[in-house]
Image: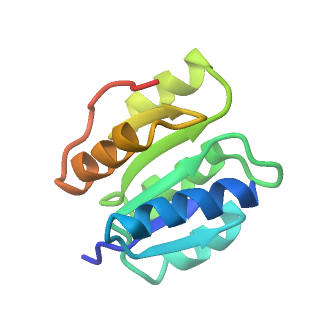
């Protein structure tokens, strides 16, 4: 499976900064502004890890998760969000998200979460 990381966030500044951070750490990155675009991609391409924003305008990250679990259950998930929401943390845990980060992200902790997820681990708990 490819080690390219998919990043799904409707905020262009988040996409830009996180893709630069991941690329500087040696990862390949594909960015998506919408959940719909990502889901079209993941149905025909293997995805090792998706970094997924929960609160997006057109299709929420929760809706993306519901589809992702059926079309690509092997894809590891890291949740990022700007809102501290216990319900979302609970869902993230239920779907086996490798990590849960509250924006703004700590670069070192985020990259450690990415490494952890790519190592095939899940259920790390929440990191906010």
Residue, far bottom:
44
Q: What's the residue at 64%, 41% (across, down)? A: 54
Q: Is residue 51 left or right of residue 84?
A: left
Q: What's the residue at 63%, 61% (across, down)? A: 15
Q: What's the residue at 17%, 54% (across, down)? A: 119
Residue 88: image quadrant is top right
Residue, far right:
57
In this picture, is 7 found above or below 3?
above
Residue 121: image quadrant is top left
Residue, far top:
86
The percent position of residue 70, horizontal first and vertical second, equals 45, 58
The percent position of residue 118, horizontal first and vertical second, equals 24, 57
The percent position of residue 75, horizontal first and vertical second, equals 35, 60
Q: Could you say which is closer to the camera, residue 78 or residue 22?
A: 22
Q: Is residue 30 left or right of residue 77?
A: right
Q: Could you say which is closer to the camera, residue 85 or residue 104?
A: 104
Could you tell me if residue 75 is visible in this image? yes
Could you tell me if residue 97 is visible in this image? no
Q: Is residue 67 left or right of residue 107?
A: right
Q: Could you say which is closer to the camera, residue 52 or residue 16?
A: 16
């Amino acid at each position: 499976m490819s080690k390219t990381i998919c990043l799904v966030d409707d905020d262009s500044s988040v996409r830009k900064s996180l893709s630069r951070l991941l690329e500087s750490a040696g990862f390949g990155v594909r960015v998506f502004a919408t959940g719909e675009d990502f889901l079209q991609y993941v149905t025909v391409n293997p995805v090792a890890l998706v970094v997924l924003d929960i609160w997006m305008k057109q299709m929420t990250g929760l809706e993306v998760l519901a589809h992702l679990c059926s079309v690509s259950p092997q894809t590891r998930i890291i949740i990022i969000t700007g809102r501290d929401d216990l319900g979302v943390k609970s869902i993230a845990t239920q779907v086996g998200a490798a990590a849960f980060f509250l924006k703004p992200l700590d670069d070192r902790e985020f990259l450690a979460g990415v490494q952890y997820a790519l190592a095939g681990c899940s259920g790390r708990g929440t990191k906010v």
